[in-house]
Image (spheres, helix red, strand yellow):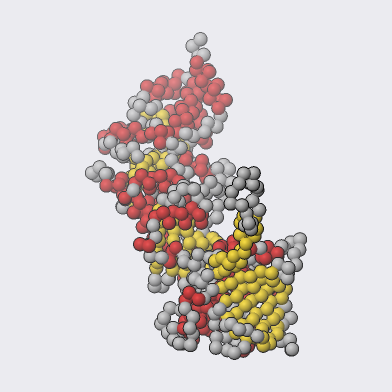
Amino acid sequence: MRQKQFKAESKKLLDMMINSIYTHKEIFLRELISNASDAIDKLYFRSLTDDSVTLDRGDYKIALAVDKEQRLLSITDNGCGMTAEELEKNLGTIAKSGSLDFKRQNETGEEVEVIGQFGVGFYSAFMVADHVTVESRAWGAETGSRWESSGAEGYTIEPCEMDWNGTRVTLHLKEDSEEERYSEFLEEYRLQELVKKYSDYIRYPITLLMPDYRPKKKENEAESGEGQEKEPEYETVWEEKTLNSMIPLWRKQKSEVTPEEYNEFYKGKFYDYEDPAAVIHTRTEGNATFHALLFIPAHAPMNYYTTSYEKGLQLYSRGVLIMEKCADLLPDYFSYVRGLVDSEDLSLNISREMLQHDRQLQLIERALERRIKSELEKMLNNDREKYEALWKEFGTQMTYGLCMDYGSHKDVLQDLLLFYSSTEKKPVTLKEYIGRMKEGQEAIYYGCGRTVEAIDALPQADQLKEAGYEMLYMTGQVDEFAIKTLREYDGKKFLNIRTDEIDLSTEEQKTALKEENEAAADLFAAMKEALGDKVEAVRFTDKLKTHPVCLSSEGGISMEMQATLNAMPGNEGRYKARVVLELNRDHPVTAKLKELAVTDKQKLADYTRLLYAEGCLIGGVPIEEPAELCRLITGLMTENQ
């Protein structure tokens, strides 16, 4: 029997495929089962037009078998089988796909689903086997053929006796080493685990003899009697069991699935203890054809806001798991969504692990994005309490999404945002804020801080409260960045009460304020000298009602943004806001400052530093020199003693 050489490729190519293309060696079982499923699909398709094929759909199956002593694992199907010529054509040429040829030849308009497209999967067997045997008999043929190979050295083909139609692939597993344990693929429960993981939704039963430990029955055992109770003896009973469920939940009609089934599927597959907040079960046809079953969790995983969290959806191709986490199917701002996608026309590369980043994948991602947004809007409008709970868990991630890619996602996210309202005393949307705006109001007012209470206590908030304007409280670290990215909403710009000039004064008040600022130029110069580069300027303001002082900022960086940016690695002290010390011109403290400007310049400097520290404390800005503040307070307390 003459040894034949592979026609198209060299030993180097086969070595590359075995050692580089697949990430995990366990993938080989998925590939061989998928090939067996394809073979059955082909025969079933033929049965639709060929009366000589007498098998019914329920007659097909894929059988696994192990021989631990001989280190053999076999995968057997009763599909179309192959002739000697087909073995030569399909297995003698690496990367030759019989499934792809079959699909091309049968493009009749009727749906033909085959998994194998590129013909590389079969050779994954050599990752775990040092010798592979393929016995196959084509439907209608009188004899079978045997193909054997030990790898890149070549292969042989010879006739063999077979009394059934189909194919059996037998792997002689490699010996175990310190690096790899190939014997695990001879363990029944390991094979069951791999079938459940990768091939659970193959449409034909995948069977294996499985051990079952039962109490041993004894002959002539007395039916009753005292003193005869003993520990039961157990025996191993081998039974052929079906390892896969065959019917994917996501391919059923939504009307056929109960909420309890969705919940149990989610908790079992994604190891969550709580039911999902929402389920998205959809099928899309057209440019991108796919089934999707998505779940919006009710709570964030413990590691969600850490670098260890890995986003992504499970990706299937006709019920076969291709990737455990396909990150390209979800935008980052919806990275908390869990679930799976089953696509019938994804462009797969050489192996089913590597996807081409093509238009098809992008179409699926955009379709899922729209569907997730629609579900969130539905929850926002119909179940506000559930949405607010969801926002507490994942709101930071969605807000962060606005800051990405220069705000290109604002159409998706802006109507999903929630901010606490000074009027409603609860979270509200921007659309709801706009709907309540006072006549003539041209801006959306907001304040930033660590808590709602801290923002509410800001001196700059007094003028809005007095005028009866609603204010939004932005307590998240990225809230202000998101608002800066939005710039405006529904034609209304955003104004920060601590940064932007919010002018609620009359023309008469504006004129008076300007004149007083000009008259107090010397006072401001002395105070600015006392504070050095801590502030850009000192001035009077109309925005304060009861407080004597406040700190505001000018330019694009607020004090809150300064703190957030400088907290990032590598940014320590890099960013600095342009801080302005603003004084209440009607407060008694201002009168005292004017007096000290004439009588005691040193005390004016001390009072200026005290007022700056007060502004920092009220505004939530860290005190840079706490020892200096303590000295000033102690000096003030002992001044008249």
* Whether residue 372 is situated above or below residue 390 in the rendered picture: below
At x 41% / y 82%, what residue is drawn? 109
**Quadrant (top left/top right/bottom left/bottom right) for the N terminus:** bottom right
Q: Please give the name of the residue rendered at 61% of the width and 52% of the height, measured from the top-left corner.
A: 222
* Relative horizontal placement of residue 184, taking residue 613 as reference (left or right): right
Residue 589 can be seen, yes or no? yes
Examine the rendering and report whether any part of residue 492 can be seen.
Answer: no
For the view shown, which residue lies furthest in the left direction?
439
Residue 213 position in % (x across, y down): 62, 57
Q: Residue at x 30, y 47 (%)?
A: 432
> In this view of the protein, which residue sits in the foreground, 307 or 141?
141
Residue 197 locus on image (x, y percent): 56, 62
Residue drawn 57% across the image and 25% down it: 627
Number of callouts: 0
- Horizontal side of residue 463 vs 366, given as left or right: left
Rendered location of residue 150, percent (x, y)? 72, 78
Relative height, residue 52 to residue 202 (above, below): below
Foreground residue, 320 or 74? 74
Q: Position of residue 179 (x, y in %)?
A: 74, 61
